[in-house]
Image (tube, rainbow, N blue to C red):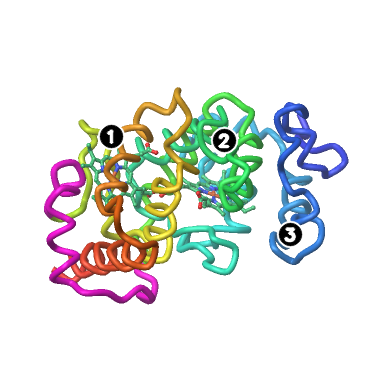
Amino acid sequence: MARLPDGDVRNQNPGHMMASVPWSAFRAGAMVPGLFALAIVAGCNTAESADPAAHGKRVFTDYCQPCHNPNAGGNADIGAPAIASLSEWYIRGQLEKFQEGQRGLHFDDIEGMRMRPMSLALQEDGEREVVAKYVAGLPAVDNTHTVHGDLEAGAKHYVTCSACHGPDAKGNELLSAPSLVQQDDWYLERQIGKFQKGIRGANPTDVTGLQMAPMANIIKDEHATQQVVDQATKDVVAYIKSLSNQ
Ligand code: HEC
Ligand code: HEC
């Protein structure tokens, strides 16, 4: 039952789908120190199947912690966001999207391509579910805010967003809209940009991504310069983060 007989994560993946993944990035850097070493020792522990919490924790430690950090508070240097306390349904759903290539396959999606192979490492039944539950149960990590903007302008933009993400930006499962308020501001800004550029939410099978993408374009006035769009994006993100103080 050893998962990675020679420690090469590519063994976990259907090779033809992985052609675009920049493997050199993994090998070259200290980007994921210990990941391969940890993965080698990961085995199938039958006692854990009776204890989903322990199983979830082990999957997290083996496969997620190297990038998202032990507290799941993320690592901005490699573009891995805080995932602690995100809703279980959202984490599970996004892992599934990464696994199916609805997210993280676009050629310009550098960070998505970093995450996708990790989702593919979850090959045993129930791993996605137990790790989603474990991460959802971790306390939220509020990293330093780095995106600044005009809160008043941001509040105006956010009126549209609140229809799905809620006035408190805590999300709405019935609409598949995730909580935004505890998410890293740099990550929110980057994701809105990805939706605007068609890097995320453009795959025809990505139903909920397709719902979100036009919303990101609402703040992208057709006649506006990129600079104006970027500022409007910062404004709405700064406003969303200001809700975390309330
Ligand atoms: C090699 C580094 C790496 C590893 C290991 C990794 N991730 Fe990620 N993860 C990322 C990056 C980078 C992103 C941001 C992708 C983007 O910008 O679209 C991400 C994004 C995510 C997201 C999307 C969050 C959101 O709000 O949309 C979830 C959920 C996630 N990771 C969960 C996990 C889980 C669970 C594991 C372990 C099974 C894991 N990740 C392992 C790098 C990693
Ligand atoms: C019609 C409902 C709807 C509206 C309105 C909406 N969103 Fe979303 N949003 C979604 C859905 C659904 C998702 C999840 C997409 C997925 O599953 O990949 C999402 C995802 C996101 C994400 C990605 C979060 C993450 O953790 O990766 C961001 C950021 C976001 N929305 C910001 C906004 C902003 C800003 C606005 C207003 C300009 C907005 N949304 C308006 C439905 C909506």
Question: Which stretch did the figure color magenta?
Answer: 142-167
Q: In the depicted view, which residue is nearer to us: 5 or 222?
A: 222
- Mark 2 and mark 1 lie on one chain; the one further toward the N terminus is 2
Looking at this view, is 98 or 46 the one in front? Answer: 98
Q: How far is mark 3 from mark 2, CA to CA?
A: 23 Å
Which residue lies at the image location 35% right of the left edge and 75% below the top edge?
145
Q: Mark 3 falls on what kind of element?
A: loop
> Would the CB of label 1 be found within 8 Å of ligand 2?
yes
Residue 99 horizontal/vertical position (percent): 57, 31
Q: Which mark is residue 146?
A: none
Location of mark 1 (residue): 176
Q: Is label 2 or label 1 in front?
A: 1
Residue at label 3?
A: 34
- Left or right, 128 with respect to 207, comes to right
Q: Which of the two labelled residues, at mark 3 and mark 2, occupies the earlier sequence position?
A: 3
Please name the residue that numbered disc 2 is placed on.
48
Circle 3 Cα neighbour tier, 10 Å, few/some/many (<14 / 14–19 / ≥20): few
Mark 2 and mark 1 in contact? Answer it, CB < 8 Å. no
Give residue 232's quadrant in the image: bottom left
Label 3 vs 1, first from the N-terminus: 3
